[in-house]
Image (tube, rainbow, N blue to C red):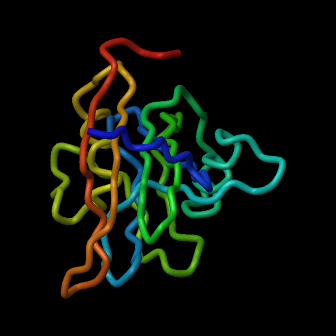
Amino acid sequence: MSAQPLTLPQRLTAFTCTTDPAGRILLIRHERLGLTRWELPGGHIEPGESTVQAAIRETQEETGLHVVPGRLLAECRHQWDGRTVGILYFQATHPGIQQAEATESGIEAVDWIDPRTLDPAETSPLAWPVIDHVAHGRSGKLYFNATHHKTSAGWEPQVIGTWRTLKSCT
């Protein structure tokens, strides 16, 4: 049996999993590749930006809210269409109860949602492991791999393995 070579990410993206004092999570409803689901805010890293700065900037651009960054919660290695993208998820908080609103085109809604009421079928498979990790108060860091497969509705992200550390890595 031969070992598979390690594929390093050709690109990094950064997202936040932001909670408010009531324990709700800040989510955006967004269409990607033909499917509209709840997702965590985030996106690409601009030249000269750190991953944390990118996650905070993207969250503000997509929701209009300034959030306070925390620890690195999760890392995903997403292999699709011959590329490998590293996805970093940072914990963040928002100090108050404030209405968020969509500030970018393509985002249908922004809302604070209690993760216990969130339907996994209405949530991006790439966001669900992170939301579940936070909702259950897990302190370790989450790692997962993902890919995409074609369905009649469009391209569907698929998580193909998860694991986590037992303690916080910060």
**Quadrant of the drawing holding the N terminus:** top left
Residue 117 horizontal/vertical position (percent): 16, 50
Q: Which residue is pictured at 37% across the width and 52% down the height?
A: 112
The relative height of residue 125 versus residue 70 in the rendered view (above or below) is below
Q: Which residue is pictured at 50% across the width and 56% down the height?
A: 84
Relative horizontal placement of residue 153, taking residue 84 as reference (left or right): left
Q: Which residue is pictured at 33% across the width and 40% down the height?
A: 2
Relative horizontal placement of residue 22, taking residue 48 as reference (left or right): left
Q: Residue furthest bottom?
A: 152
Number of marks drawn: 0
Residue 106 horizontal/vertical position (percent): 50, 80
Q: Which residue is pictured at 31% across the width and 77% down the height?
A: 155
Residue sitting nearer the eye, 130 or 104: 130
Q: Residue furthest right?
A: 48
Residue sitting nearer the eye, 1 or 112: 1
Residue 115 horizontal/vertical position (percent): 24, 45
The relative height of residue 69 versus residue 39 in the rendered view (above or below) is above
Residue 35 horizontal/vertical position (percent): 31, 78
Q: Residue furthest top?
A: 167
Relative horizontal placement of residue 58, taking residue 157 as reference (left or right): right
Q: Residue furthest front?
A: 1
